[in-house]
Amino acid sequence: MALGLGFIELSDEVREKETQHFDERVLLALRTPGHPEQPLGPVWVAEAARDVTSLGSVSVLTLVVFAVSGFLVLVRRWRTLVLVVGSTVGGAGVNSLLKSVFARPRPSVVPHLTWVLTESFPSGHAMLSAIVYLTLGALLAQLVERRWLKAYLVGVALSLTLLIGVTRVYLGVHYPTDVLGGWMAGLGWALLSALVARAARRRSPGLREESRGETAPS
């Protein structure tokens, strides 16, 4: 609920351009004064940022979901497969819808350091990486017993999501509020998917068995 209300409030501010001055100041602060085409830091930082940001691209996330789906097929966890695919495909659809509704132009105050095609708000990389990596992190966390292992898996998922969002701003292809909105929407969708999965497990003995790794061998 809090994430939903926060996203609505943020989107209203973005629509009314109340955040524009702040957004542009942050982007300019990440560039060399007088040379907006040059990002701060050594040359390798920009290349590293492009490498990290690719982890949130549609192509990479699709490969990750396909790989995980293939594993779930091999171990015959069909219900879990439906939950994973439904969460990611549904989240991608929601992101596309939100982008078309807000239709915010990409930043123009600094040159882009990587290629972009779609609208700016909310960030698709931030939102989809939150959905995919947090969903998969939570799924893997169910397969281990120790709390520190669960915390590690969720922490890795969160770290990837945060790094991907930060690189979008550093590369000048998103405003900070685009990324914040993507994080909020992605986390909200991931939590909603988790609630749906929990409710499904309560009603489905088969899904409960899958969560405990009790699926019968082939």
Image (spheres, rainbow, N blue to C red):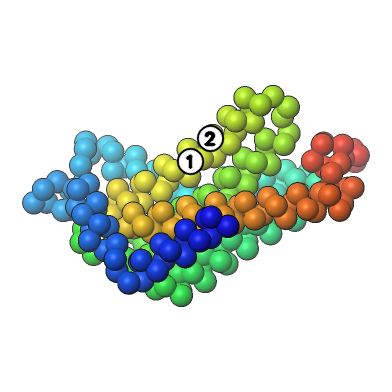
From the viewer's perspective, tell me whether residue 71 is left or right of residue 212: left
User: Which sits in the foreground, 49 or 33?
Assistant: 33
Q: Which residue is found at the position 73% from the left and 34% from the top?
A: 143
| Image position, residue 102 (x, y; %) | 42, 72
Sort mark 1 into few (<14), some (14-19) or many (20+) by Cα contacts within 10 Å.
some
Mark 1 near mark 2, Cβ–Cβ under 8 Å? Answer: yes
Badge 2 marks a residue whose secondary structure is helix
Q: Which residue is found at the position 34% from the left and 43% from the top?
A: 49
Badge 1 marks a residue whose secondary structure is helix
Identify the amino acid type marked 2. Answer: Val
| Image position, residue 59 (x, y; %) | 51, 55
From the viewer's perspective, tell me whether residue 1 is left or right of residue 81: left
Q: Quadrant of the N terminus?
A: bottom right
From the viewer's perspective, tell me whether residue 113 is left or right of residue 129: left
| Image position, residue 199 (x, y; %) | 78, 53
Identify the amino acid type marked 1. Answer: Leu
Q: Is residue 113 above or below residue 159?
A: below
Give the CA separation, mark 1 to mark 2: 6 Å
Q: Which mark is residue 130?
A: none
Residue 82: which quarter of the image?
A: bottom right
- Can residue 126 be spotted in the picture? yes
| Image position, residue 109 (x, y; %) | 20, 61
Q: Which residue is found at the position 75% from the left and 45% from the top?
A: 72
Q: Which residue is found at the position 29% from the left and 69% from the top?
A: 17
Q: Which mark is residue 160?
A: 1
Q: Pointer 2: what residue?
A: 156
- Can residue 119 be spotted in the picture? no
Q: Quadrant of the C terminus?
A: top right
Sort mark 2 into few (<14), some (14-19) or many (20+) by Cα contacts within 10 Å.
some
